[in-house]
Amino acid sequence: MKPNHKGRAQLFENPILEKMTRTHIALPISIFIIIAIGMLYYGLMHSFINLVQAIGFFVLGWLIFTLLEYLAHRYVFHMETDTPLKAKLQYVFHGNHHEYPKDKKRLAMPPVVSLLYATMFFFIFELIFGQYVFGVVAGVLFGYAMYLFVHYIVHAYAPPKNFLKQLWIHHSIHHYKDPEVAFGVSSPLWDYLLGTMPKRSNKA
């Protein structure tokens, strides 16, 4: 699928559903940073976690998010499109983004959808971590907000002259050279560990 630097895919004929697929990036970033801070505050104020536990489980949650991001990108967003239904789902989830990578209004899931996922993950992680869920999920949500920020910067601006440049190059390789590598957006960690780092020349 050849990238198109201009334009926008139409995903639904229903105008309401179509409009819901677009969002300004500042909205979900703000929502999830506020929720992450609120969860840490609630956990600390109600003695579910102390300060050291909050920091430790927050970092753990952030690390967990980078793995979830990698796995979702590699195995869900780039699923095999061997049936018409899977092809349609893949295009709605992610294929349209590869076709129109400069569409700034589709660089994040609609907040309603992402909030539903966040609620589901809260209850799953509560079963695993118990009262420490407030630190873990705060880290996961903050990681998601940082992913959205990095993803937007990569697609909306020229390569920055700071540490973000390497992430810009990494994700650009995924979009414009080889979509089967470089699945990590906010971090290349799992690409290193799981063998999907792109092979780059010395000039890259």
Image: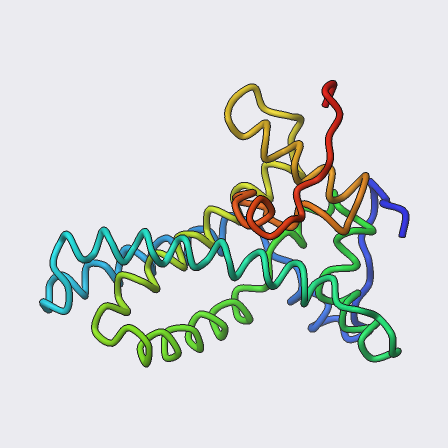
185 relative position to 116: left or right? right
Q: How many marks?
A: 0
Q: Nearer the viewer, residue 99 or 68?
A: 68
- Where residue 100 appears, as percent x and y from the top left, is 80, 49
Residue 139, horizontal then vertical, whole percent:
35, 56
- 54 w.r.t. 82: above or below: above
Please name the residue shown 60% across and 56% down the image: 108
Residue at 73 percent across and 68 percent down: it is 18
Which residue is pictured at 71% across the width and 37% down the height? Answer: 172
Q: What x and y, as percent, mark residue 52?
A: 15, 52
Q: Between residue 75 and residue 193, name the one nearer to us.
A: 193
Please give left or right for residue 83 compared with residue 65 in the image.
right
Q: Between 17 and 175, which is closer to the camera in this rendering? A: 175
Q: Is residue 177 left or right of residue 106?
A: right
Q: Quadrant of residue 138?
A: bottom left
Locate the C terminus by quadrant.
Answer: top right
Tell me: residue 116, above or below residue 107. below
Dividing the picture into quarters, in which one does residue 121 lie? bottom left
In the rendering, at what x and y percent does residue 6 appear?
83, 42
Q: For this rendering, which residue is in front, 138 or 14?
A: 138
